[in-house]
Amino acid sequence: MRVIVHTGKGGVGKTSVSAATALRCAEMGLKTIVISTDTAHSLGDSLEREIGPEPVEIYPNLWAQEVDARYSMDKYWGRIQRYLASLFSKQGVDDIVAEEVTILPGLEEGAHLLWINQYVEQGQFDVLIVDAAPTAETLRLLSLPDVTRWWFERIISIAQGATKLLRPIGKFLGRDQSSVPEDNAWQEVRVLFDTLDKVRDLLADPELSSIRLVVNPEKMVIKETQRTYTYLNLYGYATDAIICNRIIPDEVNDPYFAMWKTNQQENIAFIGEAFGSLPLMKAPLFGGEVSGIEGLRRLGQALYGDNNPAEKMFDGQTHRIESLSNDGYVLRVPLPFASKQDLDIYRSRDELTLRVGPYRRNIVLPYALWDLEIADARFEESTLNIQFSKQP
């Protein structure tokens, strides 16, 4: 099975790209499902079909689903949440407040990950396309297993201890025990967290999953997507392509669009600086709204031509960041055809610009590196290694 996740800044056309990619895969004979993890669902609108929280077949070989967070959360978390809410209610907390504060941090987003795991384990589809939320929410989602594991180890263990105490006291007092979960319920919670960990490993496996970043040829959009790409590298997720959407076609000669076209061409060149050797796919700005089977087929053809969208498009990383034992970090940038004499480095607080002969690479740094200094830079085995550390 192949998992392809599309993400990017809000409004760049992720949903249309996801739907067009899914349709293209289905028409190539691959059994495909496309799911939306964005709370503001528009996948049904793009496909011009009525879809809901369970998969619906909308075309030969093509299923679609808009994941409903509440529906999924009740499925995976409802039993334990009701118990925790009852504990708070007994302490005089309002029922509605009790229900809200017992929502596991990030679990509404995490429900999407659990669906991904289900489809991979069942193996009933050849391709799973994920229409992800805008970049900030996607990053929270992909870092979710670490956050929830911390919450689980500290909070749930306390509640589990309370259960062991409350059950015998309740029985002695003759109180209703229906809201107190049995011991196997806590085991179910452990399975839930193990599943979240497993999905992270699944999405970080480049042989199984790819993340593709959707951009428009606008400087602000590209800069935010750069930041996303850096953090995806930090978390170990494999990005295998950039999709540039809504490019004004060359045949548009109206003077009104002249400056806009010039800016777009400059920004498309900047994409090469920002993302190195990642493959770049391009889609034009169509004359009308891209929706429905015919509209999505045109978009899919423009993006992929005769190529199979499910194939891995890039093998490797354009850069990666590793932590060091002395609270520092090292940024490793593969530069296979460069020589040491051709390299220059320019640093601002949150960006690093590398000049390699006539070419430039622009890398947005994660927050953890902003206040660190460059302690060392070495070009070894066709890789530039830049060490960041605190200076006295």
Image (cartoon, rainbow, N blue to C red):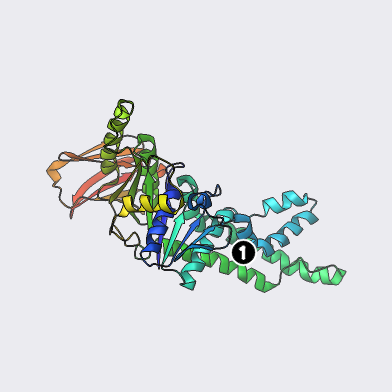
Vertical order, 371 against 210 (above or below): above
At a point 59% along the width and 53% down the height, the residue shown is 105
At a point 68% along the width and 51% down the height, the residue shown is 101
Q: Which quadrant would residue 368 be assigned to in this image?
A: top left
Do we see residue 130 in this rendering?
yes
Q: Is residue 257 left or right of residue 76?
A: left
Q: Which quadrant would residue 312 be assigned to in this image?
A: bottom left
The percent coordinates of residue 384 (x first, y second) are 22, 49
Question: Residue furthest toward the top?
Answer: 255
Q: Is residue 275 left or right of residue 79?
A: left
The percent coordinates of residue 349 (x first, y second) are 35, 35
At a point 68% along the width and 72% down the height, the residue shown is 183
Front-lying residue, 390 or 193: 193
Badge 1 amino acid = Tyr
Question: Residue furthest toward the right?
Answer: 174
The C terminus appears in which quarter of the rendering? top left
Vertical order, 209 against 9 (above or below): below
Disc 1 target residue: 76
